[in-house]
Amino acid sequence: MTTIRRAPGLALIGASTALVLALSACSSSKNEGDTVASAGASSAAKDPHVVAVTVTSQTCAADQPSYDAGGLTFNITNKDATAVTEVELLSGERIVGEKENLPPGFSGSFTLSVDPGDYVLYCPGAVTDKVPLKVTGTATSAGSTDVGALLQQGTVDYGTYVDTQIGALLTTVKPLAAALKGTDLAAAQVAYAKARPYYERIEPVAESFAGLDPAIDNRADDVPVTKLTGFHRIEYGLFSVKSLAGLAPYGDGLVTNVEKLQTLAKGLKYQPAELANGAVELLDEVSKSKITGEEERYSHIDLLDFAANVEGSQQAFANLQPGLDKIDASLSSTVAGAFTSLDTLLDKYRSASQPSGYVLYGTLTKADITALAQAVQAVAEPLSRVASKVVNA
């Protein structure tokens, strides 16, 4: 089966807006177009089809508050923000475009066709991390109002999301593998944290391929630590043994297995019920291993994995939401509201001082853990009813 992602703390902005992703936008934006920022960016901002976004430690600001509907290229420059390395464009709960791996002094871009509506630029780590963006004018396409067509489009968009996340996963495990061959333990620990969320967002997809998920993400609960081969064998070396010795082969193996995942997942087609079930599976993952502190027992960055599972679940649901709104608007609203409450709670545990972006698991109190568990359950219960609503639509 399967999954998707979202940024914490965002409420629904309104009715879902039809967006046709330029396939090169999300996929190529992960690996291409990363260049040191240059003076040429300012002249490009004058083009009405270009959104010039400047990232600072304070916020991510576009050069205008609104743009005309149609094809838009988002040119993003990270001026000086060490805590911000990505910018996302959100429509309601959906990530419709994003650019990642943008350290200070670098720039990148993504392009998509945008219909009129209210959007949000999200730059996690900035003081003001959510900035509204309005798109006006005439829709680039009429858009279908047929429930089946809406759900089908959601599955297509979800597939694009999965491909994008796996591409970003590969982009981040390669530097991790390189760091394991070096001598800087702290840098390798940071590289480990950077790679984790991409896998956690799409974990049910990997689980659909026999043997691949265990090779990438088995924990010491599953097999003895000496038999681990993926992320958590590396975690053990970096955070428990606190040594790089002998870890290089595990880094290379991780890259190889992620490349296999990318090949196997490319072009997969999904059913609406798969998205719904995958969304529930991700919340089950949270309840089973993240909320207990078992997932990252050596690094204690469990809340990063927690947030990534939630984001993946939320994105799966968001791609079904336009169709679900027509099938059962009350249920759709209930799930969306529960996700928003969970996001707001998770935001309380963000920490700019931690490479993971969240406080370490050991700092949570019993009251914190109980509140998080209850918030997850508040989403999981109504979300579990979505699959039966969409399966025959």
Image (cartoon, rainbow, N blue to C red):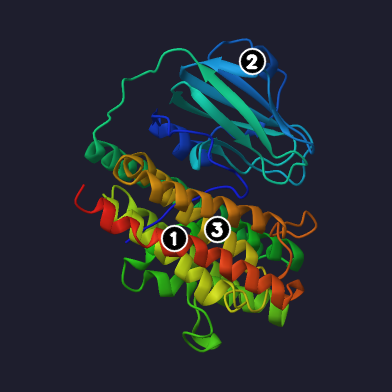
Q: Nearer the viewer, residue 81 or 156?
A: 156
The answer to whether 2 is drawn above or below residue 97 in the figure is: below
Q: Earlier in the sequence, mark 1 or mark 3?
A: 1
Q: Nearer the viewer, residue 73 or 279?
A: 279
Residue beneath disc 3: 308
**Image x and y of residue 210, in percent:** 31, 72
Tell me the quadrant of the picture where the N terminus can be found: bottom left
- Say which amino acid is labelled 3: Ala
- Say which amino acid is labelled 2: Ala
The answer to whether 76 is drawn above or below residue 152 in the figure is: above
**Image x and y of residue 208, in percent:** 32, 66
10 Å crowding of disc 2: few (<14), some (14-19), many (20+): some
Q: Residue at x 49, y 50 (%)?
A: 5
Could you tell me how far apart the alpha carbons at marks 3 and 2 are, in whole angstroms? 33 Å
Residue beneath disc 2: 45
| Disc 1 + disc 2, Cβ < 8 Å | no
Dot 1 lies on which element?
helix
